[in-house]
Image (spheres, grey):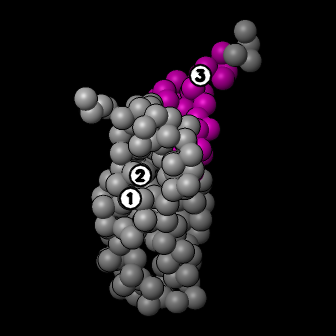
Amino acid sequence: MECLHPVLGAGDLAAERLEEANINAKTGLATDYLNHFNEVMMLLEMLPAMPDCAADVLEWEPLDYEGHFENSSFKDKNLAIMAYHAAPNYLREHLEAQVGEINALVCGIQEELRQAAEPGLVAAQIADRATHDIKPLIAAAGAVIHGHVEPEATQHEGDGAQAEIDAMFA
């Protein structure tokens, strides 16, 4: 009988197989997904020196985890998708939250570029915002992929901060 819900560490999702495919064996997530965001990040940082990169930034579209792998040349893309579905829910949800924030920021920047009379005039501000706002979110998404999520991170942002304050005074 075939297992309907694959389990990390067993069968097709054996740790050795996941590691060979560059998929974190403990989380079931692959850093290859971050390439989608690193690509647009690189373009945003290049804007001040190469304003014509604005066209490439405007072509970028959000992709969810499955969509990225379905459209990629990643050798083990089916394994990556299967492992994603076997990943702990809290990790997937946290990753999706980080990705949602990244997508919202990039889409906001795209709108700003569309409305700019001259993309070169806003390029430095956009690159700075990307470096300070988007890059840390990509790093946070990478941390999730590697299983480094603090319990507070899965709560609402304000709840985590309050828990830290409460812990200091306990």
Q: Identify residue type, mark 2.
A: Ala
**85 and 166: which one is in front?**
85
Q: Give, as a single range, the part of the protein colored magenta.
A: 140-166
Are the residues flagged by discs 2 and 1 in contact, CB closer than 8 Å? Answer: yes
Q: Identify residue type, mark 3.
A: Gln
| Image position of 45 with respect to 129: above or below | below
Q: Is residue 94 magenta?
A: no
| Image position of 116 with respect to 98: above or below | below
Q: Is residue 59 visible?
A: yes
To which residue does mark 3 refer? Answer: 162
Sequence order check: which comes first, mark 3 or mark 1? Answer: 1
| Image position of 69 with respect to 88: above or below | below
Quadrant location of the N terminus? top left
Q: Is residue 34 left or right of residue 69?
A: right
User: Principal SS element in the magenta part?
Assistant: helix
- The secondary element bearing badge 1 is classed as helix
Residue positioned 67% across, 21% down in the render: 165
Quadrant location of the C terminus? top right
Residue positioned 44% across, 90% down in the render: 52
Distance (Cα) linking label 2 and label 1: 5 Å
**44 and 9: which one is in front?**
9
Residue positioned 32% across, 77% down in the render: 59
To which residue does mark 2 refer? Answer: 80
